[in-house]
Every structure is written in C-alpha cells, then in structure tokens.
C-alpha cells in the first residue's frame, strides 16, 4: 500500500509538471486557437484523471502511455458504469497526453453503458458555489449560517454542535498534527470541534464568519440530544439531524436533488486541493486536507478529492 501510494504521488506530481508546462492557462487571456486550460477546477481535474490513469496502467512515466493503451483504458472506464459526460472528460485528458505533438488527433469515442443515470459510485457529492447560492435562498438565516460554517471549515453536521473556542479545548494529543494545516488560507479564527470516535481537531473559520458565530454565543453551555447522543452546546447554531434534514430539503427544492449536507465536506476538500493547495505536491496537499477533515486514512480522503473510479 505504501509503495502504491508513493508511486501515485509521483505520477500526480509528474502530471502536474506536464500540465503546467503545456496547458496552464489560469488567469491568461483566452483565444480561439488556444489549447490552454483556463479553469482551476478543470485544470486540477485533468491532472487527477491523467495521474490515476497512469497509475492504473502501471506506467512510471506519462510518455509511456500509448494511444492504444489510452483507448483500452477508456473502454475499461466504460465498464465501470461511468456517465457519458465523465467518459468524455477522461478522453480529453488522455488526448492531451498521448497526442501532445499531434493535437488534431482524437481517440475513438466510447459510449457509456448507462446513459440515463450516474451510478452512486460515480457521484461527486461536492456542491459548486452556484448550487450553494441557490440552496441558501431556500433556507432561513440560522440554517444559512450553518451551511456557510460547514462549507468554510469542512464540518460534519453533528460537529456544528461541538464548536468551542480554541482556549476552551485542545486537539486530541494522540494524533500528530501537521504545522502546515490551513496553508493557503487567509488568516482566520481557530476553533475546536469533536468528530468521529471523539477525535478533537482544530478548524479555521474566516474572520467575518467567526464574528457572526460569536454573536450566537450562549451565556452558558446547554445540553441537547441529537440522534439520541448528548451534546454540550456553546453556540446557538443549527446542527446535527435538524440541519441535515433542512439542507436536504432545501437542496431538493433548489436543484431537484440532494447529496446531503455531507457534500459540503466534499466541496471543502476539492476547493482546498484545486485552488488553495494547487502548488503543493499531491501527497503533501492530501495530508493537509486529510487532517483538516479529521481523517487519518488516505483512502477516505481520496474519496473526497477524487470521487470517481474503482480505487475509491
């Protein structure tokens, strides 16, 4: 497992260098003939797709991927039940590698097995900024704040009920916490939350949002039960099952579907990797996000960062 993870990280870093040299167009003017990638999310996604393909194909260098290998890989992806849209995204990413010197060439299109719906395995639960804006319009102010807190700090629904000031609690001492947590973020206010198995971790909340949170500080902590579990609550915020239900209802009203409030953690992880930690090596960025989410198993964090494929 360690060897595989090390090789995967090397391939990701190699793909990052390749795309930066040939296709990095973030912030640059667009032209009709340009082959550059101008969107950060698209740019990061293409890197992930190519590095995963190289790993699955068991090559050590991107240049070892031939057009025939890429075509066969597309067919394998079809057999996993991926949607037509995502198969096309994989095809474009592979073409950028195997036809780097012949950009007019294309791989053969592969038709998805199931064109009607994406499988649960394929679903990316992350919400975009535009989708969240629509969801917020269907929520009262108290629930809106909880959405912003969860999105800003990568919180589980029940963790909203455990918010404490940094001088009131400390991160769990049995874990080794990286000093690089919250790298790439504007200075914010640190709080402590309690997650799965009682793990206490630091989170960071933007200053303006933290100031709003402090207006909801209770004069004294109170006890409440959520899903039959007791919580000592320090802030009058919506969390737990009530928040999850309100969010899912609003999402269905706004979008016609819901990936649940847990999707806000997917949004956090992908935003961190795709925008704020993009310049760091893949393995280093993943470790930072893992600790910020309260994970200590790489395969779990990869499911948030890379929602597609059998490796997750």
Image: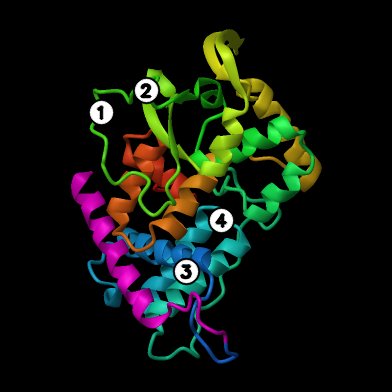
In reply to whether residue 139 is colored magenta, the answer given is: no
Q: Nearer the viewer, residue 107 or 90?
A: 90
- Residue 8 colored in magenta in the image: yes
Give the numbered dot on residue 43: 3
Q: Is residue 24 above or below residue 156?
A: below
Q: Is residue 199 above or below residue 101?
A: above
For label 2, the SS is loop
Q: Are marks 2 and 1 in contact (CB under 8 Å)?
A: yes
Q: Position of residue 93 (x, y in %)?
A: 46, 72
Q: Earlier in the sequence, mark 3 or mark 2?
A: 3
Mark 3 or mark 2, which is nearer to you?
Answer: 2
Crowd class of label 4 (few under 14; some 14 to 19; many from 20; radius 10 Å): many
The residue closer to the viewer here, 115 or 200, is: 200
Kindly tell me whether residue 180 is visible in this rendering. yes
Q: Which mark is residue 175?
A: 1
Instruction: Tell me whether circle 3 and circle 2 mark residues in contact (CB < 8 Å).
Output: no
**Residue interval drawn in magenta:** 1-30
Which label is found at residue 82? 4
Q: Residue at x 25, y 23 (%)?
A: 173
| Disc 1, SS | loop
Q: Position of residue 152 (x, y in %)?
A: 53, 43
Q: CA distance from mark 3 to mark 2?
A: 34 Å
The CA span between labels 4 and 2 is 35 Å
Mark 1 or mark 3: which is in front? 1
Q: Inspect this view and state whether residue 260 appears.
A: no
């Amino acid at each position: 497992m360690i060897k595989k993870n090390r090789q995967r990280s090397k391939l990701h870093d190699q793909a990052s260098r390749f795309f930066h040299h040939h296709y990095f167009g973030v912030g640059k003017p667009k032209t009709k003939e340009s082959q550059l990638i101008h969107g950060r999310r698209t740019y990061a996604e293409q890197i992930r797709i190519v590095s995963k393909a190289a790993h699955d194909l068991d090559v050590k260098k991107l240049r070892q991927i031939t057009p025939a290998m890429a075509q066969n890989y597309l067919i394998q992806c079809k057999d996993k039940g991926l949607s037509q849209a995502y198969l096309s995204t994989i095809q474009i990413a592979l073409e950028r590698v195997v036809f780097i010197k012949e950009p007019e060439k294309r791989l053969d299109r592969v038709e998805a097995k199931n064109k009607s719906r994406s499988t649960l395995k394929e679903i990316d639960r992350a919400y975009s900024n535009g989708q969240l804006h629509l969801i917020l319009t269907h929520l009262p102010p108290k629930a809106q704040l909880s959405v912003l807190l969860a999105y800003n700090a990568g919180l589980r629904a029940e963790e909203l009920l455990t918010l404490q000031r940094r001088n009131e609690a400390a991160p769990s001492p049995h874990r080794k916490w990286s000093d690089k947590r919250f790298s790439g973020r504007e200075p914010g206010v640190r709080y402590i939350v309690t997650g799965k198995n009682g793990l206490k971790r630091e989170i960071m909340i933007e200053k303006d949002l933290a100031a709003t949170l402090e207006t909801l500080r209770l004069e004294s902590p109170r006890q409440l039960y959520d899903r039959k579990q007791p919580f000592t609550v320090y802030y009058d915020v919506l969390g737990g099952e009530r928040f999850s239900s309100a969010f899912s209802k609003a999402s269905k009203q706004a979008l016609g579907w819901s990936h649940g409030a847990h999707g806000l953690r997917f949004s956090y992880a992908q935003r961190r990797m795709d925008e704020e930690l993009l310049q760091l090596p893949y393995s280093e960025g993943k470790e930072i996000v893992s600790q910020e989410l309260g994970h200590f198993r790489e395969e779990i964090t990869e499911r948030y960062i890379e929602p597609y494929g059998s490796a997750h």
